[in-house]
Every structure is written in C-alpha cells, then in structure tokens.
Image (cartoon, rainbow, N blue to C red):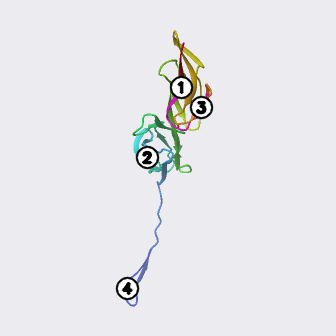
Amino acid sequence: IKVTDSSSPSLTVEQSYTLIVEKGFYESVITIASTLAAGETSVYVDGKLVAKLGGGQTTRQSFALGAKAVISVDQVVSHPTRTDVRFVADTTETTVNESYSDFTFTYHPEYFINLITDPPQITSLTGSNWYKEGSPLRSTAPAQVEEEAGVQYRFSYWLLPNGEKYTDEDLSWMVSAPGKAIATYDTYYQ
C-alpha cells in the first residue's frame, strides 16, 4: 500500500502486506421461470424455507466454499383465483456447489377437465382429471343411452372447454383450456 500526502514536496510511505484467505463463499442464484404464471412457490435450502417466489423472481443464497446445498421448491402451485388451473414443477430439487451454483426451476400449467353429459348424469364418462397443457385427452361417449322406457338419448357432439365442437363419440383433443368437456345428447321419445 502506497500513501502520498498533499504537501509540497509530497511525502510518500509504502508498506507491503500479505493476505491469506482462509475461508470464502460462493453465491447461488435461484430463479423461478416465468412459466409459473400465477401464484408463488416456496424455496427451501436443505429443507429450510428461505423465500416465496413468483414466476420471474430470484433469490440469492451464499454458501461456504466446498459446501453443497440442496435447493427444492413446491411440486404443485395452485392458481390463486382458479380451482381448475395449477402449475407443476418440471424438477423439484437440485444440488448446488461452487461450480454449479445457479439454477432455474420451470413449471408447466395443468388444467382440470371434467367430463360430463348434457342432459346431466345419463351415463358415466371416464377421464375427468388434471391434464398438462398440450397433452392428449381421450374419452368415448356411448352412441346411445336408454335411461327409461320410451326415452332414448343419442350422441350429438362434444362441447369442449375452448368452445369447439367435436362430432365423433371417440374424443381425441389436445388440452388447451380448463373446464368441462360435455358429451351432448339429443333426446328421443318412443
């Protein structure tokens, strides 16, 4: 270190020092991708809650050199205002160290699809469940249903959550919205 004062002539003093770094740290940046479009996930370091983050937010954590830490998040995040939309983590846990310190957790939306009939409850349909956006939904509605003597229901079309009509009893639809998939029947009387 060299020090010079403002006198004229200036006086200068110089001294050498040695610093020994005995311990250090590294910083880990944990990001929640903007694919978590609503709600917040909890971020844990070695099982201890350190932050609650929404999509696009980050937290910075410091760790001693040589130390590893397990970072985890909630597997499922509910939509704050809708019961038929949720977000599921693609990965829920990672281990960080000084050479692999930053990580981004991504989520994908899932939609609840309820398969029902119109008129209501004339037959049971299978397939009501949570579906990843873009995944296929397959179900079959009976072509005809006889509920009571003299009354028959004949399949007309599926009314899908996105407003589309599908006229085949064998439904095959790429899920793009939450809601009801309604097997619509016409009523016939003897």
Please name whichever residue, 95 or 85, is drawn nearer the observer in this view of the structure.
85
**Residue 127 higher or lower than 70, as above or below:** above
Q: Residues within 10 Å of mark 1 (few under 14, many from 20)?
A: many
Residue plotted at (48% across, 40% down): 72
Disc 2/disc 3 C-alpha distance (Å): 37 Å
Say which of marks 4 and 1 sits in front.
1
| Lower sequence index among marks 2 and 3 | 2
* Label 3 Cα crowd, 10 Å radius (few <14 / some 14-19 / many 20+): some
Residue at numbered disc 4: 6
The CA distance from mark 1 to mark 2 is: 40 Å
Amino acid bearing label 3 = Tyr
Mark identifier at residue 54:
2
Q: Which residue is mark 3?
A: 166
- Stretch in magenta: 171-184
- Element type at mark 4: loop
Q: Of the residues shown, which amino acid type is indicated by label 4?
A: Ser
Q: Is residue 33 magenta?
A: no
Residue furthest to the left in view is: 7
Query: Which mark is drawn over residue 184?
Result: 1
Q: Is residue 97 above or below residue 169?
A: below
What kind of residue is marked 2?
Gly
Q: Are marks 1 and 3 in contact (CB under 8 Å)?
A: no
**Residue 97 percent coordinates (x, y):** 53, 47
Query: Does the magenta portion include 178?
Result: yes
Q: Residues within 10 Å of mark 4 (few under 14, many from 20)?
A: few
Kindly indicate whether the residue at mark 1 contacts the one at mark 4 (C-beta within 8 angstroms): no
* Chief secondary structure of the magenta portion: strand
> Which is nearer the N-term, disc 2 or disc 4?
4
Does label 4 or label 3 sit earlier along the sequence? 4
Q: Nearer the viewer, residue 69 or 113?
A: 113
* Viewer-proximal residue among 11 and 129: 129
